[in-house]
């Protein structure tokens, strides 16, 4: 292995935001991402939007996956996105949302800057493929 | 934007205290992005202001939780903190789950604790190759304290002594009997031993066994009159080692009991770390460590460089597959192949020597 051989790796933050304790999905995604060769940073439970922003900025992740099953996506996701903008981190972070999101809301989230919303039953390969294709370069 | 211009801007922003720039610089270092060496070169002159403490110990010993509490303590003292936490990567896919951040519960929302998770990216030894350079980035950014948390270490993950001034080794109660304490490796590198989870049964015994180990160690080194022990013993193995520490009173590794979950004992730990720091400064050991570290760093860089020269030579000889095939069919042998590949490089070195 030589000194200047580039070793890009896709870094993902898998985040649980708000008062939502259902992290099985987040764990499954984290494991699948790991097996896909990504570096996954796990946020743990019950994070405030600020905390997610702090983690995404400091870890310089290419991908931020927010898992929400509480229905509070319309409140929480915009706060995360505004926070990322504040630190100049929005432009080159792929923001994904996973969880139970009604179709009408999906469109709103996408307008806000969420790249894709993955609902229940999405095949893991689909999500991984989407990340591979769309993760911004570092 | 050209890479150079982009890097110049990044360095400027990092020095100005922009978090995003610091994060991006560390990414470039981790990825070995084109030009990252110039970036680190540029940062080097701004470094030297941070105290670097390494935290190591077995998986589940409580490293992350303790780091969290230490960071909180330093923040209350008004100091800024950088944390680098290394977790293992998969040997099969290269992927990793970096879970140390979850334990940073006391410092969420506080941007003056800069926490960065790193994957070991296949490196053994408890750190990633990028860790030392990432520490430089945090140092140049102006962090007062930098904590490096290693991969959950087994018995021989001792790279941390090459990156940290002070090493704390966590030994949870019930880590085995006194024979484990006789073994070489990680227990030799501790400047401070932390018996974490001190509220559990068996903590007293672990403390006692560590005490015995430390006493045996100091008797042993007294007989040899080297004055070395712990992390310094590691240097003793170096060519420049022994015999120059006559004025050195030596540092007895200290044992501190903590319960990281509640924060018990953290104050004592931080004070002990500060004592070790003072000892390093007064004894001149800090400077000697730094010298040794830079020598090691230069050697590593050169090894990498020579490595890539060799890769180029291998390609020139038709690639590794072809060379291997020759060895397999008994046309040649590994030693001859190695000689053949190194020859042009040797010639260059000889030429340079004659000039």
Image (spheres, rainbow, N blue to C red):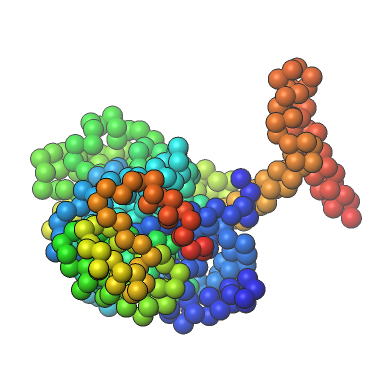
Residue drawn at point x = 29 percent, y = 43 percent? B59
Residue B105 percent location from the top left of the image = 21, 63
Residue B223 percent location from the top left of the image = 41, 39
On screen, residue B145 above or below B334: below
Residue A37 percent location from the top left of the image = 44, 46
Q: Is residue B192 visible?
A: no
Residue drawn at point x = 46 percent, y = 53 percent? A132
**Residue B25 or residue B165, whichever sits in front:** B25
Q: Quadrant of residue A56?
A: bottom left
On screen, residue B306 above or below B283: above
Residue drawn at point x = 53 percent, y = 80 percent? B12
Q: Kindly give the residue lying farthest to the top in the view shown.
A: B330
Left/right of residue A93 with respect to residue B32 in the rendered view: left
Q: Which quarter of the figure is the C terminus of chain B placed in?
A: bottom right
Residue B19 percent location from the top left of the image = 41, 75
Residue drawn at point x = 28 percent, y = 75 percent? A78
Q: Which quarter of the figure is the N terminus of chain B placed in?
A: bottom right
Q: Quadrant of residue A52?
A: bottom left
């Amino acid at each position: 292995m030589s000194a200047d051989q580039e070793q890009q790796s896709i870094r993902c933050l898998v985040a649980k935001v708000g008062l939502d304790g259902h992290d099985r999905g987040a764990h499954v995604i984290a494991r699948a991402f790991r097996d896909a060769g990504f570096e996954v940073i796990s946020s743990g439970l019950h994070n405030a939007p600020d905390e997610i922003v702090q983690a995404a900025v400091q870890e310089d992740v290419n991908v931020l996956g927010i898992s929400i099953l509480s229905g509070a996506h319309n409140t929480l996701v915009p706060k995360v996105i505004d926070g990322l903008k504040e630190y100049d981190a929005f432009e080159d972070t792929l923001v994904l949302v996973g969880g139970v999101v009604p179709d009408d809301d999906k469109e709103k989230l996408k307008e806000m800057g969420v790249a894709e919303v993955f609902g229940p039953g999405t095949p893991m390969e689909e999500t991984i493929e989407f990340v591979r294709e769309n993760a911004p370069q570092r | 934007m050209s890479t150079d211009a982009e890097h110049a801007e990044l360095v400027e922003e990092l020095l100005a205290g922009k978090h995003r720039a610091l994060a991006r610089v560390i990414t470039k270092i981790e990825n070995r992005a084109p030009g990252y060496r110039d970036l680190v070169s540029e940062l080097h002159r701004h470094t030297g202001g941070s105290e670097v403490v390494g935290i190591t110990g077995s998986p589940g010993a409580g490293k992350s939780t303790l780091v969290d509490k230490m960071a909180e303590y330093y923040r209350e003292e008004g100091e800024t903190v950088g944390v680098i936490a290394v977790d293992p990567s998969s040997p099969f896919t290269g992927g990793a789950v970096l879970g140390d951040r979850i334990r940073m519960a006391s410092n969420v929302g506080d941007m003056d604790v800069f926490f960065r998770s790193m994957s070991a990216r296949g490196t053994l030894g408890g750190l990633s190759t990028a860790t030392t350079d990432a520490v430089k980035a945090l140092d140049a950014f102006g962090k007062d304290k930098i904590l490096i948390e290693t991969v959950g270490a087994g018995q021989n993950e001792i790279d941390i002594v090459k990156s940290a001034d002070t090493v704390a080794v966590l030994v949870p109660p019930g880590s085995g009997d006194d024979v484990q304490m006789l073994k070489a490796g990680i227990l030799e590198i501790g400047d401070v031993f932390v018996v974490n989870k001190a509220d559990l049964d068996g903590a007293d015994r672990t403390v006692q066994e560590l005490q015995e180990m430390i006493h045996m160690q100091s008797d042993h080194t007294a007989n040899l009159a080297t004055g070395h022990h712990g992390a310094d013993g590691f240097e003793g193995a170096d060519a420049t080692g022994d015999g120059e520490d006559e004025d050195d009173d030596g540092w007895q590794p200290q044992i501190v009991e903590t319960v990281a979950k509640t924060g018990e004992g953290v104050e004592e730990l931080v004070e002990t770390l500060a004592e070790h720091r003072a000892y390093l400064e007064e004894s001149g050991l800090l400077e000697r460590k730094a010298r040794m570290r830079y020598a090691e760093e230069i050697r590593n860089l050169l090894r990498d460089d020579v490595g890539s020269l060799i890769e180029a030579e291998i390609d020139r000889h038709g690639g590794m597959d072809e060379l291997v095939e020759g060895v397999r069919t008994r046309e040649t042998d590994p030693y001859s192949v190695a000689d053949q590949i190194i020859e042009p490089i040797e010639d260059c070195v000889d030429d340079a020597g004659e000039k």
